[in-house]
Amino acid sequence: MKIRPQSRMHNELRQYQLDAIECAVREMTPGSRNMVVIPTGGGKTLVIAEIVMRFPGMQILIITPRVRLVQQIRPLLGEHGVLSASIGNDLGHQDNLLIGTYQTIINNPGMVPPWLIIIDECHLVPPDSQYGDLIARFPNAAVIGLTATPYRGTEKITECNIGWKQIYSVSILELIRQERLVPPRSMATLAASFGEADTSKKLFAVSKRIVKNLVQSVRKEKRKKCLVFCADIAHAIKVQELLLVEGEACVTLVHSEQNARTQDEMFETFRN
């Protein structure tokens, strides 16, 4: 097995990313189920790409839960096949590297057995499911899982019966200390108590106050962008309306009932 010591983007990686990569490579053995924990915003995609580049010519399968994550990592990879219903259908017979969504991969039994499986958002792998069966289909493959949240509900996924072993982690507080993540700041808003009756009406009333405070804060601090997470689609639509009423010129809305093209347009508008 040929291991490349580092790639062209090696010098662009942060020290904690390099530490995670070296640990993953060092602990990799046939049948291993190793897990790396890096907070959201810590650059898990770069870690995945660098691990792949360390093993040129090896049969590698990268599994993600969403098409958008497939699209996010593809530009960082070399020649590769794609197995995702909305993007491509290559079972990996022509490529040593295959990336796809698990929803498509589990329904395609004809893949070349991978030497290494990398799973993004590995906390989403239920122990008793088709996803778990997919991993079991290749018992000799080394598996590396990456996640920001190593839990399923209140249970640590290392305690599930897939057999994950946590080999590396870096905390949110540590990345804030390194100035890699921004420190969180809370904003209090007086709100009515929530009961079972008329919950949506109270939610919108509270949202109106929150939005007004949010807009004032964004303008005062001269922020260029912010993200607002809502309770459901109806709430998100209402919050968009409130932001526009408060004078925000550009408010993009993304939700699960939009088609992929609309979502792409909204994300691109946000980026711009």
Image (spheres, rainbow, N blue to C red):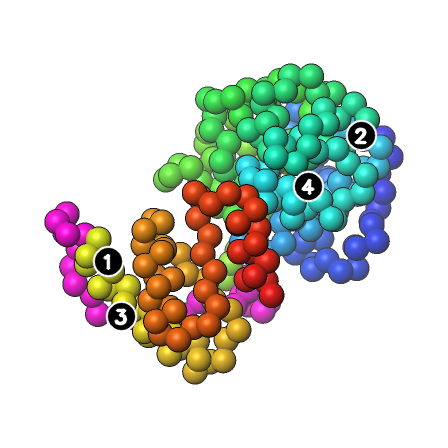
Q: Which residue is mark 4?
A: 24
Marks 1/4 in contact by CB < 8 Å: the verdict is no
The span shown in magenta is 174-199
**What mark, if any, has residue 139 been given in the picture?**
none
Image quadrant where residue 215 sits: bottom left
Q: Does dot 1 land on a helix, a strand or a loop?
A: helix
Q: Earlier in the sequence, mark 4 or mark 2?
A: 4
The CA distance from mark 3 to mark 1 is: 10 Å
Image depth: mark 3 or mark 4 in front: 3
Above-or-below relation of 264 to 191: above
Among all residues in the image, which is located at the extreme bottom? 220
Q: Earlier in the sequence, mark 3 or mark 4?
A: 4
The CA distance from mark 2 to mark 1 is: 51 Å
Q: Earlier in the sequence, mark 2 or mark 1?
A: 2
Q: Nearer the viewer, residue 226 or 11?
A: 226
Q: Which residue is mark 3?
A: 209
